């Protein structure tokens, strides 16, 4: 297993390098940079003439290396990451990019992991429930819920919830994790409850989409597995229906869902990103959109690299879980 893990990590390094090149090139492709944002701010809010604003913008480009070719900018950025762990400097936030990521990424990952746990437990449980009651009203109800979760856009659900909270229930504290009185207060039960009251829409929406997928896949795979010959043999030996389902059918039906874990973390992150943008929470989503809008390239590139890294890490974890679950993978996969 250790050799298998080391091989997967080694193979991930060139993938990350290629992703970094592609990501940086795509981000730099649109015309304009942060100096253009400064120029527009000087003209629109500072009352400067175009010539004065352009002169200051050009001076800013020279000072921060934005006037250099894209290849040079990429080499400087990736070189700083490899040699010093320096992800660059955020021109908009006026602090190192590592600080911006350190502030927003942990809370984003925590939200995504909570959503993933809820989606997996509820989705697998509902999938088993629906498959063992095929064509019943329970199966029809859960299938309808799955259809809604797979088809309704998450940003639309977020907009609907924002509308209901603001215009129907007069909720004014949108766009933060805590109420003002708990912002700098030490952790307590009251502060934790206040946190839940602010983040439950994000958790509910992101969980709903993942739950729907897990439930649909689990139901379909379990129905196929229940018709397998070894399941019929287990029933013929006199095992109870619950033992046949949980001990023989469910472990084999879980294989596709285990492989799904390789992409679920980025999926949950994007679900959190969509809803966090609507609710204006200080997480990764608003930072990515905001940095792209103003040309803060190093913030955007770093966050995109983080999302790429979560996809690679998720695939490695999925492969290891599958190897632990299925002895055949360990035997033929070199683990």
Image (spheres, rainbow, N blue to C red):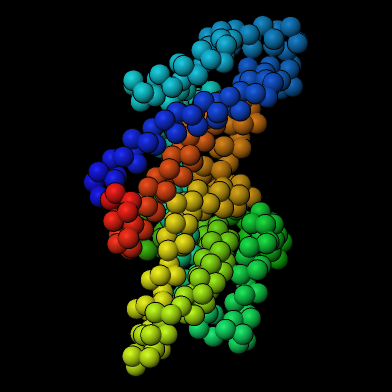
Q: Residue at x 61, y 35 (%)?
A: 290
- As drawn, is 124 to the left or to the right of 39? left
Residue 273 pos. (x, y %): 56, 47
Along the line of sight, the residue nearer the viewer: 185 or 318: 318
Along the line of sight, the residue nearer the viewer: 181 or 329: 329
Q: Is residue 163 visible?
A: yes
Q: Reply above or below: 12 against 133.
A: above
Q: Is residue 126 visible?
A: no
- As drawn, is 319 to the left or to the right of 257? left
Residue 249 pos. (x, y %): 41, 76
Along the line of sight, the residue nearer the viewer: 81 or 248: 248
Q: Reply above or below: 58 against 97.
A: above
Q: Residue at x 49, y 80 (%)?
A: 227
Q: Residue at x 29, y 45 (%)?
A: 4
Numbered marks: total = 0
Q: Reply above or below: 265 against 222.
A: above
Q: Residue at x 57, y 11 (%)?
A: 69
Residue 320 pos. (x, y %): 33, 53
Along the line of sight, the residue nearer the viewer: 34 or 309: 309
In the image, farthest residue toward the left: 2
In the image, farthest residue toward the bottom: 238
Q: Reply above or below: 209 against 82.
A: below
Residue 255 pos. (x, y %): 42, 63
């Amino acid at each position: 297993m250790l050799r298998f893990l080391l091989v997967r990590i080694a193979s991930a390094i060139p993938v990350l390098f290629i992703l970094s090149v592609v990501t940086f090139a795509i981000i730099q492709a649109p015309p304009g940079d942060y100096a253009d944002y400064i120029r527009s701010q000087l003209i629109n809010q500072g009352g400067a003439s175009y010539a004065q604003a352009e002169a200051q913008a050009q001076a800013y480009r020279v000072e921060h290396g934005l006037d250099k070719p894209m290849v040079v900018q990429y080499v400087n950025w990736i070189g700083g990451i490899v040699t010093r762990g320096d992800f660059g400097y955020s021109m908009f936030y006026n602090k190192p990019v590592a600080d911006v990521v350190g502030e927003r990424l942990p809370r984003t990952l925590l939200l995504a992991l909570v959503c993933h746990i809820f989606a997996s437990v509820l989705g697998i449980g509902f999938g088993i429930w629906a498959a063992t009651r095929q064509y019943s009203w329970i199966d029809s109800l859960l299938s309808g819920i799955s259809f809604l979760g797979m088809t309704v856009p998450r940003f639309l659900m977020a907009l609907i919830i924002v509308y209901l909270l603001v215009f129907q229930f007069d909720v004014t504290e949108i766009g933060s994790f805590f109420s003002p009185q708990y912002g700098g207060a030490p952790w307590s039960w009251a502060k934790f409850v206040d946190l839940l009251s602010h983040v439950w829409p994000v958790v509910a929406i992101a969980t709903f989409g993942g739950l729907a997928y897990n439930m649909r896949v689990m139901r379909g795979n379990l129905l196929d597995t229940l018709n397998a010959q070894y399941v019929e043999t287990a029933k013929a030996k006199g095992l109870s229906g619950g033992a046949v389902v949980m001990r023989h059918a469910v472990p084999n039906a879980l294989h596709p869902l285990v492989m799904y874990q390789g992409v679920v973390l980025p999926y949950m992150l994007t679900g959190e990103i969509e809803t966090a943008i609507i609710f204006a929470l200080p997480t990764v989503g608003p930072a990515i959109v905001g940095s792209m809008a103003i040309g803060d390239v190093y913030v955007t590139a770093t966050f995109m690299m983080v999302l790429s890294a979560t996809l690679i890490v998720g695939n490695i974890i999925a492969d290891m879980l599958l190897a632990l679950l299925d002895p055949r993978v360990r035997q033929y996969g070199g683990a």
